[in-house]
Image (cartoon, rainbow, N blue to C red):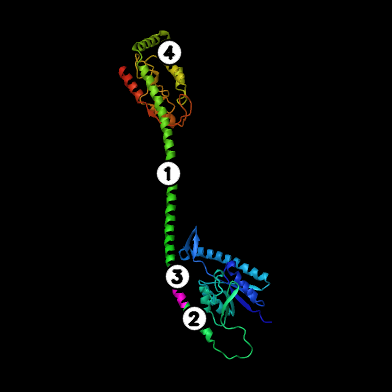
Amino acid sequence: MAAPEKVFVALPAEAKSGRSTLSWALGHFRATVIVVTHVHVPPQMIPVMGVKFHASKLNPEQVSLFRMAERDKVDKQLDHYVNQCLRMKMKCEKLVIENENVVDGLVELINLHGVTKLVISAAPDRNYSRKMDKPASRTATEIMQRADPSCKIWFVCKERLICTSGVEVEIAPGHTPFIPDTGHDALQLTLHQEQDDNNESELGFYDEIKEACKAADNLMMRALRESYRRQKADEEVVSSLQKAKEYEELYLEEVKKRKELEEALLRASEEIAQLKQERDLPKNDQNTTMEEQKEVISDNLILEASGQIIKPLQEYLDHDENCVREPETLLIQRKLAASFSPSSVMQSPFDEDCCIPSYLICPILQEVMREPCIASDGFTYETDAIRSWLDGGRRVSPITGQPIVHQQLIPNLSLRSVIQDHARRNQYSFS
C-alpha cells in the first residue's frame, strides 16, 4: 500500500494569522496528510530586566535558555493548527525548523524533504483584494522565485487561491510532447521586473531599519549607563545611611558620658563649696575646740587608761584593710584613738596644737590626703588608695557599698589647695 501523499502548509506561529490558509488546504486536500510547517527564527534581542539586549552581548547560556523557552512557546501555539485538523478529521503532522531567514528555511525544507506540494499565504488577510493575482508579501514572492520548479506551490489569501507556481504534479499516462508556455514566460519576466523595483525599495527600507537599529543600540547603551549610575547612587545612599547611624550612636554615647561627667563635677562643686564654708568658720570656734581637746588629752585618768585601751582599739582598726566601713564609724574610731592616745602615739604629721578637719582625711587610709581625687560615687579619696581599691577587683564604693558606675577619677584640685593651705598655716609638711 502506497504511503499517503503529504501537503506541506507553511504557517506562522500565531493561529489567528494562519487559520484561513490552513482552512483552504483542509478543504482542497482531503485524502492527504497535512504537514503543519513553521520556520522558527531565533530571537536576536533578549530581554533582561525590562531592557532588550542583542544576543552577541549576553552570556551564551542565557541566550540559549531564552531561545529554548521561545521554541517551546511556538510548539504550543502550533498545537492550535493540529487541533483544527483533528476537528476536520484530517491526518496531521507538525514540522518546525530553525533558520535565521524564513525564505531560506522554506527553500531548504523543499530541498531536504522533497516537497512537491506547498501551500503558503500570498499576503496577510487584511491586504486581500479581488484584483490580487500574484503574491503581495516579500516572503511569498521570494519563494516563488527560489523554490524548486518540481514543487507545486499554491498562494492563498483569505481562503481564496491567488495563483500557483511550479509544474503540475498530476501527469497524464504516456509521454506528452513539451509545449512551451509563452504567456507564462511573459508573466515570469514581468514578475522579475517588478521584483527588481521591489528590491530597490526594500534596500531603502533596509537602510532605514539599519539606522533604526543603530539608534536603538545607542539608546540601549545610554540605558545601561543610566542604570549603572543609579545603582551606584543607591549604594552610596545606603552607605551614607549606615555611616549616619554609626555617628548617631557615637553621639548618643558621648552625650551620656558628658552627662555623667557633669553630674560628677556638680557633686565636686558642692563638696568644694562645703569645704570653703568650713574653712571660713570663725577662728574662735577652732580655738575653743583645740582647748577642749587639750583638756581631754591632759586628763590624768584618761592618760592612765590610754595604755589599756589604745592598743586593742588600734589592732581592731588595722584588722582588715580591705573591709568597707561606714564613714560615721571611721570618724568615731579615729576620734577615740585621738582622745585616748598621747601625741607621741599618733602617726600623724600634726602636733598637739593642730586640729585636722575630717574632710582632709582619706576614708580608706585614715590619713591626710596628699593627692585627693573624686570617684564615681561622689566621695573624695587618696588617689593611690582608691586606685589600689579598684585594681584589687572591688567594684563597690568604700563608703556606701553601692556599685561603682565607672573607674574614672577626677583630681580634686580645690581640696588639694585647702590641704596645702592648712599645712602652711599649721607649719607642717608631708613626709
* Nearer-N-terminus badge (3/4): 3
- In the image, is residue 382 above or below residue 307? below
SS type, badge 2: helix
- Neighbor class of circle 3 (other Cα within 10 Å; few <14, some 14-19, many 20+) is few
Q: CA distance from mark 2 to mark 4?
A: 149 Å
Q: Secondary structure at mark 1?
A: helix
- Residue 252 or residue 121, whichever sits in front: 121
Residue at (64% x, 79% y) in the render: 5
Q: Is residue 64 above or below residue 391?
A: below
Q: Which residue is mark 3?
A: 205
Report how far apart the C-alphas of labels 1 and 4 lie in the structure: 71 Å
* Residue 419 location (% of width, % of height): 34, 21
Q: Quadrant of residue 167?
A: bottom right
- Residue bearing the label numbered 2: 190
Q: Main secondary structure of the magenta part?
A: helix
Q: Earlier in the sequence, mark 1 or mark 2?
A: 2
CA–CA distance in space, label 3 to label 4: 128 Å
What residue lies at 55% left-to-right and 68% top-to-bottom? 126
Neighbour class for label 4 at 10 Å: few (<14), some, many (≥20)?
some
Answer with mark 3 or mark 1, whichever residue precedes in sequence: 3
Q: Nearer the viewer, mark 3 or mark 1?
A: 3
Q: Which residue is mark 1?
A: 243
Q: Earlier in the sequence, mark 2 or mark 4?
A: 2
The number of numbered badges drawn on the structure is: 4
